[in-house]
Amino acid sequence: MYEYCFLTKNLQIFFKDYRKWEQNTRAKPLLWATPHHKTGISSNTGEIRPSQTGKSGISVFMNSFVISDQVTSKTKYNIKELMMCTIKKETIKDLEELCEQLQERNLQMARSIMDTDRSSFARTNELLIQTEQKRRSTVALKRWKESLVKSAKTELRDIKEASQTHLSGYLQNQLDLLKVKVVEAQKELRRLKTYKDMEFPVKGLQIADMERKLDRLKEMEQKEQKELNLFFKKEMVNLERRQCEKEQVLSAKHASHFPSIVKLMASQNDTMREEIHKQKRLVMEMERKNEELRKCIRELQLSRPKNLRREIFPDVFLKSDK
């Protein structure tokens, strides 16, 4: 980059004066030309002047041909030089533009480098600040943790001492209560032993006697209940019979006033009534039996053994187990 700039500056200094590259119409002196030929050529316009000596037309023609040839080669040379100058100018211009672009890029790179340096410095400074803050936070957190641990240890020690004091007092109270309960239990045990040895046999005999009396009373109650039921049934039968007799007497008394068809219907009604009563009694008896059967079924279900086949055939299952 710096080499391009140096080259551009040198070229600018070298091509600063373009006068030597401009077109010059002054003809170069011919080596073989005589002084008369040299004086015949104008120093400014290059035109051929007639010689003062008054030579022939052939010499003039030859001189004009040589001069025109020199002018043509000079023009070509000037054109070539102008083209070279133009190319060099364009090259210099391109180089200048390239130098400007390179300078601009250098400036941009310098700015980007400076920006990168600033951002890196700011980021580094920020990271350093964060690191310092983290370090301070870590130190503060460590101190806080140590203080918490210290306070927790102190609190634990106080709680332990208080709990030991409280627990020792509580256990002592419990021990005293247990001792009292043990003494009371020993007294109760002695009373029970005395009761077992002396009062229990007497109480047992009394209880057995009372159980026998209770069984006899139950049997007597059952007998009385049966007798009462029989008496009630008999009285009910007697009452029904008396009522039927009264109804028959009344019906016979009033039947004399009714025709035979009505009497027949009345007798049939009585027969049907008796049959209905019988059927009701049978239904009640069947319901009672059904209720007894339900009770027996429930008792059997409750007392049903787990393995019925083993209960029915104990010998077979005992042999199979063996």
Image: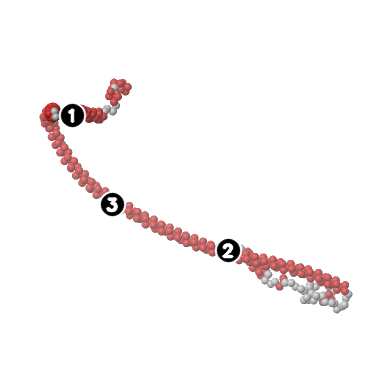
Where is residue 66 drawn, in percent x and y?
Answer: 83, 70
Q: Which residue lies most toward the right here?
A: 56
Task: Read off the residue under disc 2.
Answer: 105
The image shows residue 228, relative to residue 168, as above or below, that is above
Residue 224 in view of the camera: no
Which residue is painted at 15% across and 35% down in the image?
189
**Of marks 1 and 2, which one's residue comes earlier in the chain?**
2
The kind of residue tagged 1 is Val
Which residue is painted at 19% across and 42% down in the image?
175
Which residue is painted at 32% across and 23% down in the image?
321
Task: Read off the residue under disc 3.
Answer: 155
The kind of residue tagged 2 is Arg
Residue 170 falls in which quadrant of the image?
A: top left
**Of marks 1 and 3, which one's residue comes earlier in the chain?**
3
Where is residue 210 drawn, in percent x and y?
Answer: 12, 29
**Where, quadrant-wise, is the C terminus in this rendering?**
top left
Circle nearer the viewer, 2 or 3 = 2
Q: Is residue 199 left or right of residue 317?
A: left
In the foreground, 150 or 236: 236
Q: Is residue 238 left or right of residue 133?
A: left
Residue 318 falls in which quadrant of the image?
A: top left
Q: Secondary structure at mark 1?
A: helix
Residue 34 in view of the camera: yes
Q: Secondary structure at mark 2?
A: helix
Tag shown at residue 262: 1
